[in-house]
Image: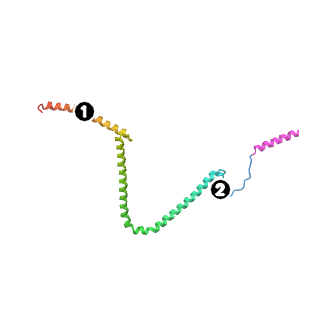
Amino acid sequence: MSCLHLSLSIHKISLMADRAPTQRATRPTTTHSGSTFLRKLQVHVGSNSSQLVGLLTLIISGSVLLLLTGITVTGSVLGLTLLTPLIIISSPIWIPMGIVLFFVVAGFLSFCGFGLAVVAGLSWVYKYFTGLNPPGSDQVDYARNRIYDTASHVKDYAREYGGYLQSKVKDAAPGA
């Protein structure tokens, strides 16, 4: 009976080993924010090398852009500081010159825009009269036919009504 008891005990121990949760020995964690960040980073990025390369690219490009932003702001402040007296002294020249330059540029751009509109319109008219059917030509044809139909109806109505009026005039003044 001892052999049976021993085999049942071994079986019972193996079942208990399967059910028992495995616990790992944990090390005490430190409260350093840098090491906590690195641990979280290691857990999230882990073994995925493409995420690691993306993160490194983000850090490097962000640093370069931050450096360039600092250089730009510093250069702007220094340039404005050094050139402000010159701008103030020469402002009686700059303001009228700026106004004249504004009107010259506005006139030139308006001229170019109107010229482009005229060229586009003439091109459309040329295509329309040569029968190449530019966009919108069907609407122009429809409007032209509608105007022609309306004009012919008005002409017919005027003939009928005009004849009626002429007969009324002759009735009112027979010698006229």
Q: At which x and y percent is residue 60?
A: 59, 57
* Residue under label 2: 38
In the foreground, 133 or 18? 133
For label 2, the crowd category at 10 Å Cα-Cα, with few meaning under 14, some 14 to 19 and many 20 or more, is: few
Q: Tell me the quadrant of the picture where the N terminus can be found.
A: top right
**Looking at the picture, does residue 126 appear above or below residue 34?**
above
Quarter of the image where the C terminus is located: top left
Q: CA distance from mark 1 to mark 2?
A: 93 Å
- Considering only vertical position in the picture, is 8 above or below 25? above
- Extreme left residue here? 175
Give the image location of residue 121, x and y in percent: 35, 46
Location of residue 146 by image quarter = top left
Where residue 37 sits: x, y (%)? 64, 56
Q: Is residue 40 left or right of residue 21?
A: left
Q: Residues within 10 Å of mark 1 (few under 14, many from 20)?
A: few
Per the image, the residue denoted by label 1 is 157
Magenta: main secondary structure equals helix
The residue drawn where x is 51% and y is 62% is 72
Label 1 SS: helix
Query: In the shown orientation, is residue 108 left or right of residue 47?
Result: left
The reply to whether the magenta stretch includes residue 9 is yes
Nearer the observer: mark 1 or 2; the answer is: 1
| Range of magenta residues | 1-20
